Image (cartoon, helix red, strand yellow):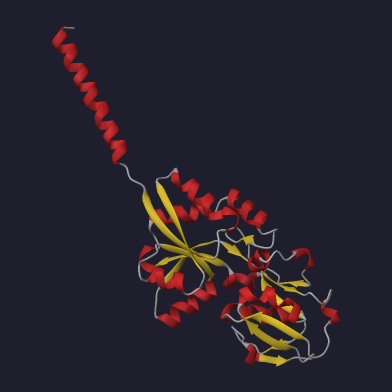
Amino acid sequence: MKKGQWFGLVLALVAVFSLTACGKSAQKETTVKLGIVGSDKGGVWKTVAGNLKEQGIDLKIVQFSDYNQPNIALRDGDLDLNATQQRSFLATWDKDHKSSLTPIGDTVIAPLAVYSKKLTSLKQLKKGASVAIPNDSTDETRSLELLADAKLITLDNKALPTLHDIKSNKLGLKIKELDPNLIPTSLPDVDIAIINSGIAADARLNPDKALYRAKVTKASKPWINVVAARKGDVHNKTYQKVVKAYQQPQIGKLIKKVNRNTVLPAWNLKL
């Protein structure tokens, strides 16, 4: 091969490698903003974000302290996704705000449980005993259903019962509605309290000492937590990758570990 031909071949190879390098450098990550309420306990979402890096997705976790704000931010386009709420809460929020946020994947279910600093059994409850329950609409319903399941009250046959739907209360329980996050600190002031498993874990309550725990059944479907998106983004492939990265056995094991088996992965429940 002549010298000129060698020179031309070298230039061609340099051009190919340069184009390849430029192509790689031109590849940019896709940023996805996801809202959560409270801390990323146990680094669950941090782990998901690390796994998504390999797929060219930069998952930014945005923390909120209020359950309404992530929906407002998602609706207004300040978030791409959120993972903060149960299906029932989202449906009610959409209706009340004339919005169209939509579940695109299940995350966890956090059964409610009964805790007490004064009693070791529900059989020890006396007439007029005080009961603290969460004051948000979905957990209020779940709490009343738990009390009914424990045979402490009966409810009118209504889809989403409230305090007004208590049909009988044989012990005359004094039910107090409190902010869910404040209930653990109210335990010394009440006889029993119904607490979301995630909040109980944050408060370092021993799940083995719960007096009663809600059963996970087919009727629990409205209480499954979800990743939500705007309606027009339901089939967004990048967002579906975020859901898939969350719904992995590794993440399921981590969820159980950091919550001491009181919060359960919901995407593979057979209800």
Does residue 23 appear to the left or right of 160 in the view shown? left
Quadrant of the rendering where the C terminus is positioned: bottom right
Asked if 84 appears above or below 250 in the picture, the reply is below
Give percent across and percent down for residue 189. 74, 81
Q: In terms of image quadrants, where is residue 20?
A: top left
Name the outermost residue toward the left.
4
Residue at the extreme top: 2
- Residue name at image x 24 percent, y 27 percent: 16
Q: Quadrant of residue 175?
A: bottom right
**48 is higher (above) or lower (below) than 134:** above
**Residue sitting at x 64%, y 88%:** 157
> Which of the 4 quarters of the picture holds residue 28?
top left
Q: x%, y% of residue 226? A: 52, 65
Q: How many marks?
A: 0
Q: Residue 119: image x %, image y %?
A: 83, 76
Residue situated in front as seen by the camera: 217 or 196? 196
Q: Residue at x 42, y 57 (%)?
A: 239
Q: Please state which of residues 136 and 226 is positioned toward the viewer in this rendering.
A: 136
Residue 149, percent from left and from top: 73, 79
Classify residue 246 as left or right of residue 151. Answer: left
* Residue located farthest toward the right when viewing the structure as drawn: 124
